[in-house]
C-alpha cells in the first residue's frame, strides 16, 4: 500500500493533501489537481457502478452517444437536487482563508478571481447584492460560506437530511458526478470530457456530436444553447460573463492564474477548437427569433407581417411570444405559422404599427448564412438598428461567444511521466501506465491502475484522499482537515456536555456513508446523523478538543476510544482500523 511518509510533507503538500478531504471551492481554486482527484474518487466508489444495474440504463451500451448522455441526464435530474446553502458545511471568514493561502497566491489575484473576495465578473449577482443573494447579509462582511464539494457518497446521503428526498450537491459536485457517470454508465472516454470552473460556477464540455455542456443537473446541446429559453440563458451566463479559471482533463489542468499548465497541449488545443465551434452558429429565422426571445427588451422594436385570410396582418412581436406559453408551437421553427394562426383577431392589425420594423418569416435574409453576412444584410434592411448599438453587440455575443478561457501562453509541463515498473497487489511486476483509465475496464482494474499512477499523476494520488481510502493514505492530513475545517459538528454540539454529545452520537445509526475502511468527516456524521463507531469517536474528539486539549483517540480492532483527564468514551467500530492520536 503506497502511503506518503508523514515526514515528507512541506507546508504546501500538507495543505493540499488535507484539502483533498474537505474539497472546498477555495481549496480547489488553489489546488486545481483536486478537481480531477474527486472525479477519480467517484469513479473508484462503488456507488455509480450500481447505476449500471438500474433498469433505466438497460441497453444503454447499444444507444447512440447523445442518447446515452440524455439517459444519464434524466437519471441525475430524478435523483439529485442542486443545493447551495450556508448550513450544510458552515461558515469561515476571509482573514482565516487569506492567512491559510497567503503563501500560495497573491491576495489581489484572489480578489479578482473569487466571488466572495471582491470578484465582480457576473454583474447579475452584484446587481442583486451577492451577500444578500447567498443569505450572508445577516453576518459580518468578513464571514463567507465554507462551501465544500461533495463526494458521491455525501451527495447520496442528503436524503437523510430533513426536507430532502433526493441526493444533492453544489455545482462542482454535480460536475464531478457527471464526469464519473458519463464514464461509468455512458462509456464516454474521459479524454472527451473537459471540466470548466469559473469563480461562480462549474460546467463540463463533452466532445460528442456538436458538443454538449453539462450545467448543474441539466445538459445543453448546441441547438439548446441557441434556443433563447430561460434555462439556456442560465446555462450561458457563466460563459458569457465570467473568466474560466481552470480547465481540467485526465491529462492535467490549465489555470488562468498559474503560469504552468499540466494539461496535454494538444488536448487543450482540441478543447479550444471544439468549444469555439460550439459557441458559434450560422443564422436563420429560428436563430434570429431565438435571440429576440432571450433578449426580450428588443422585441418592441419589431412586428411580424403575415398573410392570413386573404390579407396581410401585423402583430407586435412581444404579443406573438406571449402565445408560446401554453402552446406546443413556437416562433421561428416550422410550427411558427401555426402559432400565428392561434392568435386572437384583436391582437392583429390590418395596418403596420408605426415606428416598428417589419419582418416576415419568408424574408430572404433568413436563408441560413454566416452570422457576419447576416448582420450586414440585417443592417442594410433595417438601418434604424444602427441607432441601437447594444442590439448588434448582444446579437454577436448570442451567435458567436468568445469565452474567456485560460491563455495558451503557459509553460506546458509533462508531469505524467512514465514511472518505473511497480509490483501490483498480486506481487506481479507490471509497467505503470500514465494513460487515463478506460470505460471498458472494471472498477477493480481502474482502482489498480490509479494506484499504479499515483507516483506520476498528482490527481490520481490525491484521489485516494478525496475518496477517503484510508488504507492508502496518511493520517496526518486527515486529522488536520478534521480539526481545522469541520465547523458544523462543533457548532451543533456547542452547548452540550461531553456526556450529552456521546449519548446523542450513540443514538444515531451505526452506519457509515462510506463502504469498507473509508471514513466520513465529523461534519458528514452530523449532517447525516449516522456513522461508524470510529467516525463517531473522531467527531467526539473534534468537539472535545476545543475544551479538553488532552483528548486522545485510540482505535484497536473493533473498539474506538476517546480518553482524557476525567473522561473515557467507547464506541464499537466495524471499520477495524488501527488509529492512535
Image (cartoon, rainbow, N blue to C red):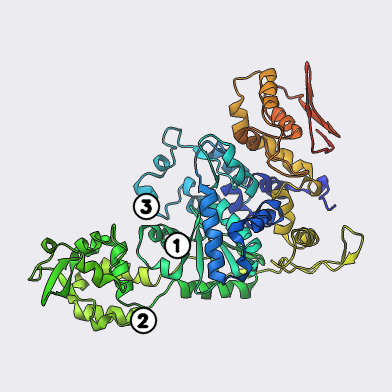
Q: Quadrant of residue 488?
A: top right
Quarter of the picture containing the C terminus is top right
Find numbered disc 2 in the image and state the secondary structure of the residue it sits on: loop
Q: In front: mark 3 or mark 2? A: 2
Front position in the image: 327 or 251: 327
Say how many tags the image has. Answer: 3
**Would residue 531 appear left or right of 328 to someone viewing this image?**
right
Find numbered disc 3 in the image and state the secondary structure of the residue it sits on: helix
Q: Residue at the location (74% across, 59% down)?
A: 443
Front position in the image: 333 or 328: 328
Q: Residue at the location (66% across, 33% down)?
A: 530
Q: In front: mark 2 or mark 1? A: 2
Q: Residue at the location (30% across, 83% down)?
A: 367
Mark 2 vs 1, N-terminal side: 1
x, y percentage for residue 427?
A: 92, 60
Find numbered disc 1 in the image and state the secondary structure of the residue it sits on: helix
Q: CA distance from mark 3 to mark 2?
A: 30 Å
The residue carrying pointer 2 sits among few (fewer than 14), some (14 to 19) or many (20 or more) residues within 10 Å by Cα, namely some
In the rendered image, the vertical position of residue 383 relative to residue 3, given as above or below = below
Q: Quadrant of residue 33?
A: bottom right
**Would residue 248 appear left or right of 359 to someone viewing this image?**
right
The residue sitting at the left extreme is 351
Residue 487 seen by the camera: no
Give the labeled residue for mark 2.
Answer: 370
Residue 568 seen by the camera: yes
Give the labeled residue for mark 3.
Answer: 124
Q: Quadrant of residue 234?
A: bottom left
**Would residue 466 appear left or right of 65 to someone viewing this image?**
right
Give the labeled residue for mark 1.
Answer: 239
x, y percentage for residue 273?
A: 52, 76
The residue carrying pointer 1 sits among few (fewer than 14), some (14 to 19) or many (20 or more) residues within 10 Å by Cα, namely many
Amino acid at each position: 500500500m503506497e502511503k506518503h511518509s508523514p515526514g515528507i510533507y512541506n507546508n504546501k503538500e500538507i495543505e493540499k493533501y488535507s484539502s483533498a478531504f474537505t474539497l472546498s471551492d477555495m481549496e480547489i481554486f488553489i489546488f486545481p489537481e483536486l478537481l480531477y482527484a474527486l472525479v477519480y474518487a467517484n469513479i473508484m466508489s462503488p456507488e455509480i457502478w450500481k447505476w449500471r444495474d438500474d433498469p433505466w440504463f438497460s441497453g444503454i451500451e447499444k444507444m447512440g452517444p447523445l442518447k446515452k448522455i440524455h439517459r444519464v441526464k434524466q437519471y441525475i435530474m430524478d435523483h439529485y437536487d442542486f443545493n447551495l446553502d450556508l448550513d450544510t458545511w458552515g461558515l469561515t471568514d476571509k482573514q482565516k482563508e487569506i492567512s491559510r493561502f497567503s503563501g500560495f497566491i497573491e491576495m489581489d489575484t484572489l480578489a479578482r478571481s473569487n466571488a466572495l473576495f471582491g470578484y465582480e465578473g457576473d454583474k447579475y449577482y452584484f446587481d442583486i447584492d451577492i451577500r444578500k443573494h447567498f443569505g450572508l447579509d445577516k453576518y459580518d462582511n468578513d464571514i463567507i460560506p465554507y462551501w465544500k464539494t461533495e463526494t458521491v457518497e455525501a451527495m447520496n446521503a442528503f436524503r437523510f437530511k430533513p426536507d430532502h428526498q433526493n441526493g444533492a450537491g453544489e455545482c462542482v459536485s454535480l460536475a464531478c458526478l457527471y464526469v464519473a457517470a458519463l464514464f461509468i454508465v455512458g462509456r464516454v472516454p474521459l479524454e472527451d470530457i473537459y471540466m470548466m470552473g469559473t469563480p461562480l460556477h462549474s460546467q463540463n464540455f463533452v466532445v460528442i456530436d456538436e458538443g454538449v455542456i453539462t450545467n448543474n443537473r441539466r445538459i445543453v446541446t448546441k441547438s439548446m444553447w441557441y434556443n433563447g429559453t430561460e434555462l439556456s440563458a442560465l446555462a450561458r451566463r457563466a460563459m458569457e460573463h465570467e473568466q474560466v479559471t481552470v480547465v481540467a482533463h485526465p491529462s492535467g489542468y490549465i489555470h488562468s492564474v498559474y503560469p504552468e499548465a499540466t494539461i496535454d497541449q494538444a488536448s487543450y488545443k482540441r478543447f479550444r477548437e471544439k468549444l469555439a465551434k460550439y459557441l458559434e452558429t450560422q443564422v436563420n429565422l429560428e436563430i434570429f427569433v431565438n435571440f429576440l426571445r432571450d433578449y426580450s427588451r428588443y422585441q418592441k422594436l419589431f412586428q411580424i407581417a403575415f398573410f392570413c385570410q386573404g390579407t396581410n396582418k401585423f402583430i407586435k412581436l412581444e404579443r406573438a411570444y406571449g402565445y408560446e406559453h401554453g402552446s406546443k408551437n413556437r416562433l421561428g421553427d416550422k410550427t411558427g405559422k401555426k402559432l400565428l394562426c392561434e392568435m386572437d383577431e384583436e391582437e392583429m392589425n390590418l395596418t403596420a404599427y408605426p415606428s416598428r420594423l417589419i419582418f416576415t418569416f419568408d424574408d430572404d435574409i433568413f436563408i441560413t448564412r454566416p452570422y457576419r453576412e447576416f448582420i450586414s444584410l440585417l443592417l442594410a434592411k433595417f438601418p434604424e438598428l444602427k441607432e441601437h448599438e447594444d442590439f448588434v453587440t448582444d446579437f454577436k455575443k448570442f451567435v458567436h461567444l468568445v469565452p474567456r478561457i485560460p491563455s495558451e501562453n503557459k509553460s506546458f509541463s509533462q508531469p505524467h511521466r512514465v514511472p518505473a515498473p511497480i509490483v501490483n497487489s498480486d506481487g506481479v511486476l507490471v509497467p505503470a501506465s500514465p494513460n487515463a483509465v478506460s470505460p471498458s475496464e472494471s472498477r477493480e482494474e481502474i482502482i489498480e491502475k490509479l494506484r499504479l499512477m499515483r507516483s506520476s499523476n498528482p490527481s490520481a494520488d490525491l484521489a485516494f484522499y478525496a475518496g477517503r481510502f484510508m488504507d492508502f493514505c496518511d493520517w496526518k492530513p486527515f486529522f488536520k482537515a478534521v480539526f481545522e475545517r469541520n465547523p458544523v459538528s462543533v457548532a451543533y454540539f456547542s452547548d452540550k456536555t461531553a456526556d450529552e454529545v456521546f449519548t446523542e452520537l450513540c443514538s444515531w445509526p451505526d452506519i457509515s456513508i462510506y463502504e469498507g475502511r473509508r471514513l466520513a468527516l465529523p461534519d458528514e456524521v452530523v449532517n447525516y446523523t449516522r456513522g461508524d463507531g470510529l467516525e463517531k469517536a473522531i467527531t467526539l474528539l473534534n468537539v472535545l478538543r476545543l475544551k479538553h486539549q488532552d483528548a486522545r483517540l485510540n482505535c484497536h480492532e473493533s473498539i474506538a476510544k476517546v480518553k482524557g483527564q476525567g473522561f473515557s468514551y467507547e464506541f464499537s467500530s466495524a471499520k477495524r482500523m488501527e488509529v492512535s492520536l
